[in-house]
């Protein structure tokens, strides 16, 4: 009897431990989503401030918000990461282009 109880108790402890650790997953994903959304919107706003917002940045944010409503946080995070990257690159591109246009000689 003792030989059966010990492995059964060990299996129960492992199973319960697995359930407890996965209970916060949705909450953690939602927190990651919230911070990624804030970062993507900030990057979009920064790019727009120098007229460097790329065409699909807003679409990625909108699609990510729709995915999050369906609790598909993995897809939402991927889209927000892409939107943030586009915002950062759009800002860099616009400021770089401005610097190039200011390099012309004064007689032009």
Image: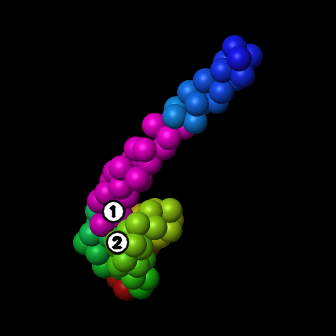
Tell me if residue 105 comes above or below residue 22 in the rendering.
below
State the extent of the magenta-drawn residues as a range.
18-41
Mark 1 nearby-residue class (10 Å; few <14, some 14–19, many ≥20): many
Quickly name the residue at label 1.
Answer: 37
State how the image is colored: rainbow
Residue in the image at 40% along x and 78% along y: 63
Q: Quadrant of the C terminus?
A: bottom left
Q: Is residue 88 above or below residue 4?
A: below
Residue 27 position in % (x across, y down)? 36, 49
Q: Residue at x 71, y 17 (%)?
A: 1
Which one is earlier in the sequence, the residue at label 2 or at label 1? 1
The image shows residue 75 at horizontal and vertical percentages of 50, 68
Question: For the residue labelled by badge 2, is the local secondary structure a helix, a strand or a loop?
Answer: helix
Is residue 96 at least partly visible in the picture? no
For label 1, the SS is helix
For label 2, count other residues whose C-alpha is less than 10 Å away and answer few (under 14), some (14-19) or many (20+): few
When asked about the image quadrant of residue 93, the answer is: bottom left
| Disc 2: which residue | 69
Q: Nearer the viewer, residue 49 or 36?
A: 36
Say if residue 40 shows up in the picture: yes
Q: Position of residue 52 (x, y in %)?
A: 36, 76
Locate residue 46: give its quadrant.
bottom left
Q: Residue furthest right?
A: 3
Q: Is residue 12 magenta?
A: no
Task: Farthest residue to the front: give it.
Answer: 1
């Amino acid at each position: 009897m003792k030989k059966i109880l010990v492995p059964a108790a060990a299996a129960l402890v492992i199973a319960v431990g697995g359930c407890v650790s996965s209970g916060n997953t949705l909450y953690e994903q939602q927190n990651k989503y919230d911070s990624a959304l804030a970062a993507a919107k900030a990057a979009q706003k920064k790019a727009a401030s120098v007229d460097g917002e790329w065409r699909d940045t807003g679409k990625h944010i909108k699609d990510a918000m729709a995915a999050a409503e369906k609790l598909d946080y993995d897809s939402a995070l991927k889209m927000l990461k892409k939107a943030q990257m586009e915002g950062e690159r759009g800002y860099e591109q616009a400021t770089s282009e401005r610097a190039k246009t200011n390099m012309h000689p004064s007689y032009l």
